[in-house]
Amino acid sequence: MRAAIITGPGTTQVVEVPDPVAGPCDVVVKIKACGICGSDALYISMGGLPPHQGRMPLGHEPAGEVVEVGRDVIGVKVGDHVVINPIGAPSGIIGNGGATGALAEYLLVESAVRGQSFEVIPAEIPFDVAALNEPMAVARHGVNQTRPTPADKVAVFGAGPIGLGATMAYKSLGVEHVTVVDLIGSRLDKALAIGADAVINAGDEDVSGRLIELHGAGEALWPGKSGTTIYLDAAGAPSVISTALGAAQRGARLGVVAVHKEPVPVDFINIMANEITVVGSMGYPTEIFEVTKDLAANWEKYAVIVSHTFGFDEVQGALRTASTPGAADKVVVTFD
C-alpha cells in the first residue's frame, strides 16, 4: 500500500509499505479520509518525532471502512464505517510519532476494542466530515475544561476548526449564549452558520465593548468589565489573552486550547483580585468518542468546517495548503 511519511526536515514522500494484516485482536481499516492538522506541519519541519525521525508516518485524523476483523474482536464487522482513536494504539500514537499513520491507504487498529480504539458511525455520514472526529474531540476537551453550564455566556476567540468545534460543543451542552471572535469575515460567517449566537470582527470592532453589549456589564473591582463568564482561546495570539483577561469579570474562566509559540505576559494582580481561573487543555483524555454522537446527529453543520479536500494523489498539495497561513481552514485528504 501507499503511505505518506516524513523523510527528513521539511520533506515528505509517498512510499510503498507492506499491507497490514489483522491479528486475532486487530482490525484493518481502509482509510477513506484523513484530516491534516497544524501539528503535521510542525512534525514535518522537525523531520519527525523520535523514535521514527527520518521515516515517520503521518496522519492522525482518520475515518474509514473496516475490511478485516480479527476473530476475537466484537462489535464490528467488515463494511462498517468507523472513526479511530489515535492515542489508543499500543505501538504509539497514530501519526504522532507512532509506528503507523492514517495518511495511508490502510491502517491496522491494534488491540481493537469498540468504544476505546474505534467507534462505528452511521454510513450516511460523508467520510470527510467523519474525519473531523479527532479535532472535534480536542475542541470538546477544551470546552469541558471550562466547566460550562447552561447559564454561561461564552466568548470563543478563533473561528478555525477548533474554535468552530468548541462553539458547537458549547451549544450542544445547552450554553445560553456563545459569541465568536475572529479577524476574518468568512470564518465569522461559518460561525453563524454552525450556531453561534453572535460574532465580533476584532479587526474593526471594539471586542470588550461589544461583549458588554452582548453579555451585559460584569462585576469586578474595576469598571468596564463584561458579563462574559467563559473565554476560550482557540486562536493562539497573545492579544487574545490580554483582551480576555482585560474584559474578565470576577470569577470568569479562561480556557486555553490554542498553541502559543512564545511566552505571553499575564497580569496576575488582575487574576488574583478578580479570582479568574485560567485552565489549559491538551488532547482528549476521554472525549474522543464523546463527540461522535453529536457529529453523527449534526454532520451537515460540521461539514461547514471542511474548506478543502484533496485526493491522496494530491497529498503533497494538501500538506502545502494546510501549512500555508490563511490558505485554508480545514484540509481533508480523501481516498478512493
Image (spheres, helix red, strand yellow):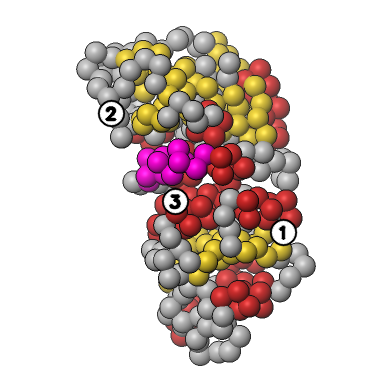
From which residue to which does the magenta span run? 287-299
Q: Is residue 212 magenta?
A: no
Q: Looking at numbered disc 1 in the image, what kind of residue is underneath it?
A: Leu
Q: Position of residue 110 (x, y in %)?
A: 33, 23
Comparing 151 with 8, the one in front is 151
Label 2: which secondary element: loop
Label 3: which secondary element: helix
Q: Is residue 273 left or right of residue 157?
A: left
Q: Is residue 46 left or right of residue 205?
A: left
What is the C-alpha distance between the residues marked 2 and 3?
A: 22 Å
Mark 3: give few (<14), some (14-19) or many (20+) Cα within 10 Å.
Answer: many
Q: Looking at numbered disc 2 in the image, what kind of residue is underneath it?
A: Val
Question: Residue at point 75% right, 64% down?
Answer: 203
The answer to whether residue 134 is seen in the rendering is no
Residue 248's disc is none
Residue contact between numbered discs 2 and 3, judged by CB atoms under 8 Å? no
Question: Residue at point 41% right, 66% down?
Answer: 150
Q: Which residue is mark 1?
A: 183
Q: Which residue is mark 2?
A: 113
